[in-house]
């Protein structure tokens, strides 16, 4: 007879899980593996709410294995370490991001790009090396191999820093890889949500001129006054879109809904780069003529490896970059998911796990 999630491992755990495609989360008792020689046990204090969590609990990508405990923007305190652990000690503030395992031997892993490993183990809704399911950060405790634990800078706020573990690295990695770091160059940020608002902050920290590209005119004031963008371009204004043709060196496209690419491509200069990190659930139409005639490039990127994520956290600490968040209690998560589906958040929900989960 198969063991229940609560019986599977020796360490008792408690969180909130979705049991079906309604996506409704409720209290859930389960278990974690014993802390091994290379493991770090983390008491979870905060966990960001990512758009991927919403897709996953509703099985919108067809990959969900219920029950599912979401959450891969985790910040907490080390409570136990294995005898082989050198980098961390009890009491350290640490982070856990999108992945908790990889093969460690493939070409991607050898290049510190574990996020592209064919045998990647995601923080939740994945199968770990022992054959059991992984559960995420909407819970009180997590046990992770030391290789995938991140040192969280002391001067980075735990709550507002949590979303950097996914939203932050998702835009930082392509900006570094595709050369979007040259001071004075012009960066367009398409979409002003959880990813886009952090991309604006990175762009300004790199010394770029930053224009937010959005279909929501109401976001102009906050884009410029609150986030520090240099300008704001409304996609529904034909005159302004026409005036902006050929003015940008790069565009990072964070939009997760289906949207036309041609207007974005037209904004790029010769040799311009459009890099997409949003994940629309239907194919986008791509015309080849603008690419050929402008020697333009379209690329993609998926989070980042452990080494680069640590680099990103240290960069944020040095430049005072955090996410703009709305802190919620765990029992407010279903309402938060409803609001997230309507883009009704500025700009990231973070669950105060340490102060609310234990109070149920």
Image: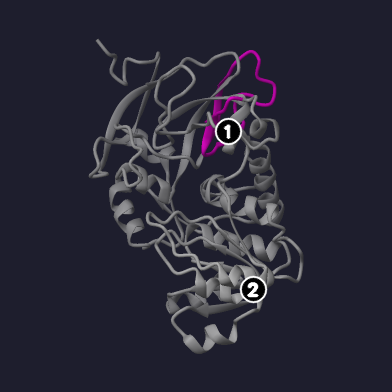
Mark closer to the observer (1, 2): 2
Residue 21 or 351: which is nearer the viewer?
21
Give the mark nearer the N terminus: 1 vs 2.
1
Q: Secondary structure at mark 2?
A: helix
Q: Is residue 131 above or below residue 114?
A: above
For the residues labelled 1 and 2, the Cα–Cα distance comes to 35 Å
Residue 227 or 286: which is nearer the viewer?
286
Q: Is residue 231 above or below residue 13?
A: below
Which class describes the residues within 10 Å of circle 2: few (<14), some (14-19), or many (20+)? few
204 sits to left or right of 51: right
Q: Residue 293 has which mark?
A: 2
Residue linked to disc 1:
117
How far across and down, in percent of the image, does residue 68 sit? 33, 34
Q: Which residues are magenta?
A: 76-103
290 sits to left or right of 255: right
Q: Is residue 79 magenta?
A: yes
Point 47% across, 27% down: residue: 142
In which quadrant of the rendered image does the N terminus lie? top left
Point 70% across, 35% down: residue: 111
Point 73% across, 70% down: residue: 185
* Badge 1 vs badge 2, beta-carbon distance below 8 Å: no
Residue 121 or 14: which is nearer the viewer?
121
Point 59% across, 30% down: residue: 148
């Amino acid at each position: 007879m198969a063991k229940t999630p609560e019986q599977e491992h020796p360490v008792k755990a408690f969180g909130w899980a979705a049991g079906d495609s309604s996506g409704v989360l409720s209290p859930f008792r389960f278990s974690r593996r014993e802390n091994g020689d290379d493991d770090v046990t983390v008491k979870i204090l905060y966990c960001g709410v990512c758009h991927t969590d919403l897709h996953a609990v509703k099985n919108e990508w067809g990959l969900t294995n219920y029950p599912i405990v979401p959450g891969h923007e985790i910040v907490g305190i080390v409570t136990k370490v294995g005898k082989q652990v050198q980098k961390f000690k009890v009491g350290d503030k640490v982070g856990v991001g999108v992945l908790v395992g990889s093969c460690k031997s493939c070409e991607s892993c050898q290049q510190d790009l574990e996020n592209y490993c064919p045998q990647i183990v995601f923080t939740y809704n994945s199968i770990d090396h022992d054959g059991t399911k992984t559960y995420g950060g909407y819970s009180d405790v997590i046990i992770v191999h030391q290789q995938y634990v991140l040192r969280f800078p002391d001067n980075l706020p735990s709550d507002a820093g949590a979303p950097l573990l996914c939203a932050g690295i998702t835009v930082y990695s392509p900006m570094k890889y595709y050369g979007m770091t040259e001071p004075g160059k012009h960066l367009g940020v398409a979409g002003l949500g959880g990813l886009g608002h952090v991309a604006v902050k990175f762009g300004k920290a790199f010394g770029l001129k930053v224009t937010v590209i959005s279909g929501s005119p109401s976001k102009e004031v906050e884009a410029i006054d609150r986030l520090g963008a240099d300008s704001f371009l409304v996609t529904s204004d034909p005159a302004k879109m026409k005036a902006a043709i050929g003015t940008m060196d790069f565009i990072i496209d964070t939009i997760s809904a289906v949207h036309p690419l041609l207007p974005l491509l037209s904004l790029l200069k010769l040799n311009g780069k459009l890099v997409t990190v949003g994940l629309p659930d239907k194919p986008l139409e791509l015309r080849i003529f603008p690419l050929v005639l402008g020697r333009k490039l379209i690329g993609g990127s998926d989070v980042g490896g452990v080494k680069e994520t640590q680099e990103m956290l240290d960069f944020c600490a040095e430049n005072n970059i955090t996410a703009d968040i709305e802190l919620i209690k765990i029992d407010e998560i279903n309402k938060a998911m409803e609001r997230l589906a309507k883009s009704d958040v500025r700009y990231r929900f973070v669950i105060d796990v340490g102060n609310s989960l234990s109070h149920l």
